[in-house]
Image (cartoon, rainbow, N blue to C red):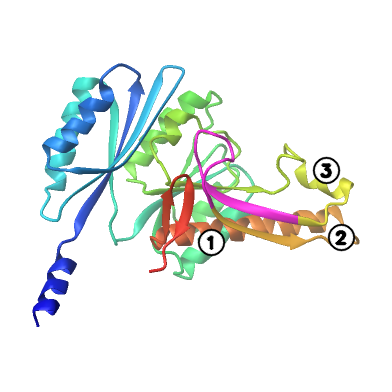
Amino acid sequence: MINNEKISSKKVLKKIVVGITVVGEDREGIVATFTNFVFSKSGNIENVNQNVIKGLFGMYLEASFAKNFDVRNFDSEIQKLAKKEKMDVNTHHETNSQKNIAIFVTKEPLCLETILSAAKKKSLKGNISVIVGTEKTLQPIAKKIKVPFIAIEEKNQEKAEAQIIEVCKKYNIDLIALARYMRILTPNFVWRYPNRIINIHPSLLPAFPGPLAYTQAYERGTKIIGVTSHYVTENLDQGPIIFQDSFDVNPNDTLEEIKSKGQKLEANTLLNAIKLHLENKLEVRWRKVHIKSK
């Protein structure tokens, strides 16, 4: 009887985990400022990662608090601190409720259509809140399903990302899926969504780089082609791997057949990674993705 009470009390003692991103101009003491703030709120730092590139500072703090922790008050106070320190700070709270998804696209529709099809069948534990495009090619697809489509055609990536950041804030985005989004995101953006941006790339890299990867593979007689889904980091296509799959290439396959198989696999691999993330089955430790057993 006593043992049962102990077990029951342990189940009640859950903690609230808050992810904190800090981005801005690098200067001395900024790490201590925010870690001390967490400690002042009786928080325990579970994870911390920081980086500096060309004077731009980025830090991700993961802190845990007691179950009765006042999240709203914490968010309000850390924004006051952010304003004082002239840093851009965002907080993210993991919940069991549906996550808001932003899909970034350019002009290839298959990955987008595959994700939307899964959402229609209610096999995604998330809400597709907005579709962001570098052009308006795929806008009719979004219009058909009545999902907001925002075209950001600014060619300067830094200026474009400033607009995208505002869109993501407006829709309170939890997860970003790069569905054949043909732009390279900068650290200034990536650091704001640690382990919350998912991309894909074919295993043809680095042997066959560029937009004609399938053509080069076809010409060289590649026998197997794989696709990798991964979290996005500041290092292009080198983030923690989530899911991988492959298909065999028949010597009689035409280039178009190989492309078709590859694009379908890309879409399915991206979708599988998104599902795992939305189901809270993924955990990143030491730059490796671990799939939770429960």
From this view, report whether residue 60 is shown above or below residue 281.
Answer: above
Residue at the image position 10 percent from the left and 76 percent from the top: 5
246 vs 122, nearest the viewer: 246
* Pointer 3 with pointer 1, Cβ within 8 A: no
Viewed as shown, does residue 186 lie left or right of 91?
Answer: right
Q: Residues within 10 Å of mark 2 (few under 14, many from 20)?
A: few
Residue at the image position 47 percent from the left and 64 percent from the top: 119
From this view, report whether residue 182 is shown above or below residue 252.
Answer: above
Residue at the image position 32 percent from the left and 41 percent from the top: 170
- Assign a secondary structure to mark 3: helix
Residue bearing the label numbered 3: 216
Q: CA distance from mark 3 to mark 1?
A: 27 Å
From this view, report whether residue 69 is shown above or below residue 50.
Answer: below
Read off the magenta span: 225-241
Residue bearing the label numbered 2: 253
Q: Residues within 10 Å of mark 1 (few under 14, many from 20)?
A: some
Q: Looking at numbered disc 1 in the image, what kind of residue is underneath it?
A: Asn
Q: Which numbered tag is attached to residue 294?
A: none
Residue 251 is one of the magenta-drawn residues: no
- Assign a secondary structure to mark 2: loop
Q: CA distance from mark 2 to mark 1?
A: 26 Å
